[in-house]
RNA sequence: GCUCGUAUGGCGAAAUUGGUAGACGCGAUAGACUCAAAAUCUAUUUUUCUUGCGAAAGUCUCGGUUCAAGUCCGAGUACGAGCACCA
């Protein structure tokens, strides 16, 4: 039999014996291994997918042999723009394109022998699945967590379409290069910002890698500061937010956001209305351009006719408009302290404004601003009335206290994280199950009418005005109000791609439940995702959305834990052999199918985890792949050395036990590459033996099985053992991992001068005798005095001489 | 600009708590087998000096702690990733 026949044989065996299908409520302890389900693109499985699926497959296979009930599921995240674009071009329904792509992906995965439980497969585009995505949206709505708001979107006037931020990178349309403008649209929003603190705290209940946690923390972007009320001369007031309240005596002006509500409120009293309105218009055009270019200058204008009153000194202070202040963040207004803030400084220079220094140290008022570390030891306040002389830390506290006591300030937290814009003007997404009635307003669909299916048409084009293509399909849009029964219209926006992937891991626990998205019992059995692997690019947003979604479900009593993912790890990319990202245009794409047919799936699997640090990007090398093929061939040839004897070969025992220990640990520590090298060492050692026992060989095959499952099963069968997938993982004896003899280095004054072979339990005196009798060592000791003899048992000897 | 990460042979990379730097693999060189090739096997492969024994230097740079530093501490450089006017 050739390699490909062997691989087919065992893939069929696993299918026929339902080897990887798991039941809920099994008596074995549960273990849930999850890889991010892919978007089934037209180009098929990428070798990068193979890397992470293999690594997680190895964990799943090993855990199974260790007696766990392992859930390792696979599905499809199939809504999204590429399928839609492809479908429009070819005049077919996107679900057709998706169906074909899934078939390709699944076939490729089967050929690689991944131990997925295919009985739990689903696609986010299945009505049986998105029914529950829609149902969950209704829960958000019913718990007052979803609302409509008018927000600006990226709009290409040429293509007449709404663009995502990614498609509008650099302020121009990705397709036609036209400058993108902002357009106001009414969109569904989820109140994610209100979960900021919970999402921060929840990280303590996870085992995410430090890097992943930091990503989450940065994205949430918490800052603690003070909100201060500022009175306006002649009545009225506004609030500012600051994290540096200690610099309050340094205020020389205020700046408010051109895109905020405040300027609209003040407008009637503005004297230079024309100038102000012009600036607001300009900002609208600019706000979507590449921000880095805007960084070059601080634009804005004074708001004439309105002056603010300094909250402490009661001096009159001018107010300016400036687009470096964001309407959506904080209060949309800031106090400007040009002596101690870079942006305020730049603005003051650009508009020729006064500066006042209130912290001692480098005076920046008369020269170019330089970053100053005034929080360093000794930084004291100056020019700050009774607070002069205090340290920054003391002043922060005391000034806050004073203002809070006066009732004009509050300590508040601010977060960069905003509410989640949940509408997309696209066809190929989950329809949002809301109906607009002239009389009743927005009315949620009745839950029993779900799923709200996408219309079954293959001909649809984007509309001219940026509405979803669904808007033109009037049969679908027109309906009746669930509340009053009058004619009404459906929401035509669909959900973002992130929706379906925010809860799919829950569905895998109870994949085909027709009555619930997943039963509480099944979720309680699986408990949570034990091990979640994905790309670095998803560790910020996808993970945050998923955690938000789960926390919401928890708060309304639908899932058992507030955090349903325990460990999150991320893998590096597989690059082309030229060290660049694989892409058709660069001609450096490797197709896994070609590799499988030439070298076999086992070789590809072993190579992908052996190629380097799992968490780092690694370039592809077909030469190195051949090395892994040689290793597999060597394992096959070792069968000729097998003799019919019981137990391990005595002399091999220490290495065998060490290997079991290392492969077991490395497989759970993301060190797949060293697990493979351990197995290579074991195979090389076997090769140097005249003969090995069946048990020796079976052990090697078992340890290699998670990585190369086909050939190891075949060889194992040939020596008369029952299938590895139905047996148990070997255990090691710690005592037997220790060698009787070790060779250690001998240093003189810290320089290596020789080595010595000693017994593991040898006494220091005996080691010393051996060492000073070594010829090359004696040479150095001759005529010198030994000041110190350092012996670290079984590690090293260092002799200090004078 | 901010945050995080990385830096070790010709190449991909190893090196639990500081303890023989370069495991394992690729590539390369020489040899065995062969009519020949492939495959396989054996030896060498950080650099420099030496016929050899051996010696000197060596983990981005500079400095420090230590009997001992790739690993710990301080300062810096380069590259990569993410965020980017967040008050």
Image: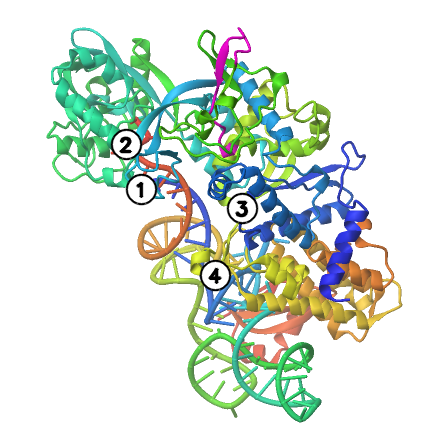
Q: Do the residues labelled 3 and 1 touch (CB within 8 Å)?
A: no
Look at mark 1 in the image and give the residue it sits on.
A170
> Are there few (<14), some (14-19), or many (20+) residues within 10 Å of tag 2?
some
Q: Mark 1 lies on which chain?
A: A
Q: Judge left or right: residue A352 versus residue B21.
A: left
Q: Decide if residue A592 is on the left or right side of residue A358.
A: right
Marks 4 and 1, how far apart at CA: 27 Å
Residue B86 place in picture, x, y as percent: 33, 30
Q: In this view, does A623 lie to the left or right of A110?
A: left
* Mark-to-mark CA distance, 3 and 1: 26 Å
Find the distance from the CA under tag 2 to the CA under tag 4: 38 Å
Closer to the chain start, of discs 2 and 1, is 1
Secondary structure mainly formed by the magenta segment = loop
Residue at the image position 71 percent from the left and 27 percent from the top: A513
Say what secondary structure mark 2 lies in.
Answer: loop
Q: Do labels 2 and 4 share a chain?
A: yes
Q: Which of the chains bears the disc numbered 2?
A: A
Q: Are marks 4 and 3 on the same chain?
A: yes
Q: Is mark 1 on a helix, strand or loop?
A: helix
Can you say which quadrant of the picture contains the N terminus of chain A? bottom right
User: What residue is shown with label 2?
Assistant: A287
Q: What stretch is highlighted in magenta?
A: A480-498
Q: Mark 3 points at which residue?
A: A41
Image marks 4 and 3: residues in contact by CB distance under 8 Å? no
Q: Which of marks 2 and 4 is nearer the N terminus?
A: 2
Q: Residue A173, percent across and down?
A: 33, 40
Is label 4 in a helix, a strand or a loop?
Answer: loop
Q: Are marks 2 and 3 on the same chain?
A: yes
């Amino acid at each position: 039999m050739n390699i490909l026949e062997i691989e087919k044989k065992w893939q069929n065996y696993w299918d026929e014996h339902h080897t990887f299908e798991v039941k809920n409520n099994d008596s074995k302890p549960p273990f849930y291994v999850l890889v991010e389900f892919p978007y089934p693109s037209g180009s098929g499985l990428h070798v990068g997918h193979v890397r992470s699926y293999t690594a997680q497959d190895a964990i799943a296979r090993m855990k199974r042999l260790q007696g766990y009930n392992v859930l390792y599921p696979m599905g499809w995240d199939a809504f999204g723009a590429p399928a839609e674009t492809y479908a429009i071009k070819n005049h077919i329904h996107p679900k057709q394109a998706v169906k074909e792509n899934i078939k390709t992906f699944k076939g490729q995965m089967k050929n690689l022998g991944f131990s997925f439980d295919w009985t739990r497969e689903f696609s986010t585009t299945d009505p049986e699945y998105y029914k529950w995505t829609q149902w969950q949206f209704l829960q958000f709505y019913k718990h007052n967590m979803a609302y409509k708001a008018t927000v600006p979107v990226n709009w290409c006037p040429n293509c007449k379409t709404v663009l995502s931020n990614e498609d509008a990178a650099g302020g121009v349309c990705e397709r036609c290069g036209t400058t993108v403008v902002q357009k106001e649209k009414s969109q569904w929003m989820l109140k994610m910002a209100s979960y900021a603190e919970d999402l921060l705290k929840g990280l303590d209940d996870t085992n995410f890698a430090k890097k992943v946690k930091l990503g989450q923390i940065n994205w949430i972007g918490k800052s603690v500061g003070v909100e201060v009320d500022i009175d306006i001369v002649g009545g009225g007031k506004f609030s500012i937010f600051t994290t540096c309240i200690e610099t309050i005596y340094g205020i020389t002006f205020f700046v408010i956001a051109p895109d905020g509500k405040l300027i609209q409120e003040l407008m009637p009293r503005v004297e230079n209305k024309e100038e102000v309105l012009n600036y607001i218009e300009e900002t609208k055009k600019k706000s979507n351009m590449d921000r880095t270019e805007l960084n070059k200058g601080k634009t804005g204008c004074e708001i004439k006719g309105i002056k603010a009153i300094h909250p402490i000194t009661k001096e009159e202070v001018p107010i300016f408009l400036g687009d470096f202040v964001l309407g959506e963040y904080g209060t949309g207004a800031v106090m400007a302290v040009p002596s101690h803030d870079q942006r305020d400084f730049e603005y003051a220079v650009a508009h020729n404004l006064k500066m006042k220094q209130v912290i001692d140290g480098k005076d920046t008022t008369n020269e170019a601003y330089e970053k100053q570390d005034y929080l360093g030891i000794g930084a004291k306040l100056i020019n700050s009335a009774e607070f002069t002389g205090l340290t920054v830390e003391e002043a922060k506290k005391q000034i806050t206290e004073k203002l809070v006591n006066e009732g004009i300030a509050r300590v508040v937290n601010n977060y960069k994280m905003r509410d989640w814009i949940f509408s997309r003007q696209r066809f190929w997404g989950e329809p949002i199950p809301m109906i607009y009635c002239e009389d009743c307003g927005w009315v949620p669909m009745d839950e029993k009418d779900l799923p709200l299916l996408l219309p079954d048409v293959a001909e649809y084009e984007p509309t001219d005005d940026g509405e979803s293509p669904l808007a033109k399909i009037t049969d679908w849009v027109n309906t009746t109000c669930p509340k009053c029964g009058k004619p009404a219209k459906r929401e035509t926006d669909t959900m973002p791609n992130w929706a379906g992937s925010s809860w799919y891991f829950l569905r895998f626990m109870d994949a085909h439940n027709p009555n619930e998205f997943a039963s509480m019992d099944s979720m309680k059995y699986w408990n949570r995702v034990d091990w979640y692997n994905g790309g670095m690019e998803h560790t910020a947003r996808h993970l945050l959305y998923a955690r938000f979604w789960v926390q919401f479900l928890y708060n309304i009593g639908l899932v058992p834990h507030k955090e349903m993912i325990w460990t999150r790890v991320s893998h590096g990319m597989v690059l082309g052999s030229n060290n660049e990202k694989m892409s058709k245009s660069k001609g450096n794409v490797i197709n896994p199918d070609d590799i499988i047919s030439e070298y076999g799936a086992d070789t590809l699997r072993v190579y992908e985890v052996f190629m380097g640090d799992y968490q780092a990007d690694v370039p592809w090398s077909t030469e190195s792949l051949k090395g892994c093929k040689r290793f597999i061939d060597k394992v096959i040839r070792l069968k000729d050395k097998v003799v019919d004897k019981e137990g391990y070969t005595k002399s091999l025992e220490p290495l065998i036990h060490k290997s079991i220990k290392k492969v077991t640990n490395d497989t759970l520590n993301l060190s797949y590459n060293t697990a493979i090298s351990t197995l290579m060492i074991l195979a090389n050692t076997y090769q140097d033996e005249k003969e090995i026992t069946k048990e020796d060989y079976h052990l090697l095959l078992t340890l290699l099985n998670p990585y190369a499952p086909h050939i190891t099963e075949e060889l194992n069968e040939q020596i008369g053992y029952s299938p590895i997938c139905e047996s148990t993982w070997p255990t090691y004896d710690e005592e037997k991992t220790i060698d009787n003899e070790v060779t250690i280095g001998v240093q003189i004054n810290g320089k290596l001068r020789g080595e010595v072979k000693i017994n593991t339990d040898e006494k220091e005196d005996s080691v010393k005798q051996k060492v000073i009798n070594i010829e090359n060592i004696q040479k150095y000791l001759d005529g010198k005095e030994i000041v110190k003899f350092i012996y670290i048992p079984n590690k090293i000897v260092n002799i200090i001489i004078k």
